[in-house]
Each structure stands twice: as C-alpha cells, then as structure tokens.
Image: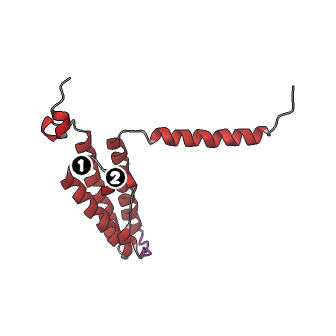
Amino acid sequence: MTEPLVSTQTANEQLRRADERWAAAVRGLRPYAERLRELADAAEHESRALLLSDLANVKWNPRPGARNIRLAYEVEEASGRPGPRELWTRFDRAVKQLGIALEGESIRAIADAFSQLSGITRDLADAVDQPIAVDEQPSAAKGRTA
C-alpha cells in the first residue's frame, strides 16, 4: 500500500465542505413558491422574537441606512420575479417599511414590519403556486398546440 498524499483529516474536511456546498446547491433548486414560504416563515419568526424582546424591555440599536435594505436578488424587480405585479408592489413597500423601522428605536415597529412582510410573502407564494391561466400565458405560448 502506498503512502497517502494527504491526511485523512484533510480529506474528510474537504469532503464535508463539498457535501455542504452540494446540499446548498440542491436546496437552491427548490420551487420558487417554497422558497418564498421559507422567507415568510423566517420573517414571522423574526416578528415573534422581536415581540418577545419588547416584553423583556430590550432596547433596539437603530441601523442607519437600513431603509436601503436589499433581500435576495430573486425577489428584486430586475430578477423577472413571477406572480402578480400588485402583490410584488406590496412586497416592495413592506421591505421598504422594514428598512425604515430598522432605522428607528421601536422594536414593536420592527416586529410589525416583519409580520406584514411575512403575510405578503405568504400571499405571493400562494399566487406563484397557482397554475397559470390561459389568459395569463405569454402570447407566444397561446398560439401553440400540443
């Protein structure tokens, strides 16, 4: 048997890192609506944790510049996000309100902003999960036959 070129520890560490990257890449292939629901759930958890902090009289440290908050690219307008434009407009306003709240000192206002964002994001997930009606399909797709 030949002497190994690397230690078992190094090989195992590299394999662990590769496994983590692979798992993250595969998770990234989940349906869009599922990822929106995860965002909604995370926002709801933030809201609850902040309300609990408010009950404990925790003081919030304002975050200057937070009104320019940006979430993942896939929920930005330039990404070509699917779903009703009206819901995305509400989503964009909720993100803006969250940023404004983060700049302030009120934990309750931040919790409310997260809660609002959660609800709108959940509505978006439900809308995106619905099959596209024939009238909503792009015009090129309407003319095709199976």
- Rendered location of residue 1, percent (x, y): 87, 25
Report the residue at 42% width, 68% height from top.
Answer: 56
Front residue (pair 129, 52): 129
Give the residue at x 26% y 53%. Answer: 119
Q: Relative to 33, say whether 54 is above or below.
A: below
- Foreground pick, 37 / 27: 27
Q: Which residues are magenta?
A: 56-63
Q: Amino acid at mark 1?
A: Asp
Determine the secondary structure under disc 1.
helix
User: Which numbered dot is residue 123?
Assistant: 1
Residues packed near mark 2 inside 10 Å, few (<14), some (14 to 19) or many (20 plus)? few
Residue 108 lies in quadrant: bottom left
Q: Badge 2 is on which residue?
A: 79
Q: Position of residue 41 (x, y in %)?
A: 36, 50
Measured as percent of width and height from the top left, residue 81 is found at 30, 49
Question: How many other residues sit within 10 Å of disc 1, few (<14), some (14-19) or many (≥20)?
Answer: many
Disc 1 to disc 2, C-alpha distance: 19 Å
- Confirm whether the magenta stretch covers residue 57: yes
Is any atom of residue 56 visible in this view? yes
Single out the residue that lies furthest toward the top: 146
Give above or below for 58 relative to 9.
below
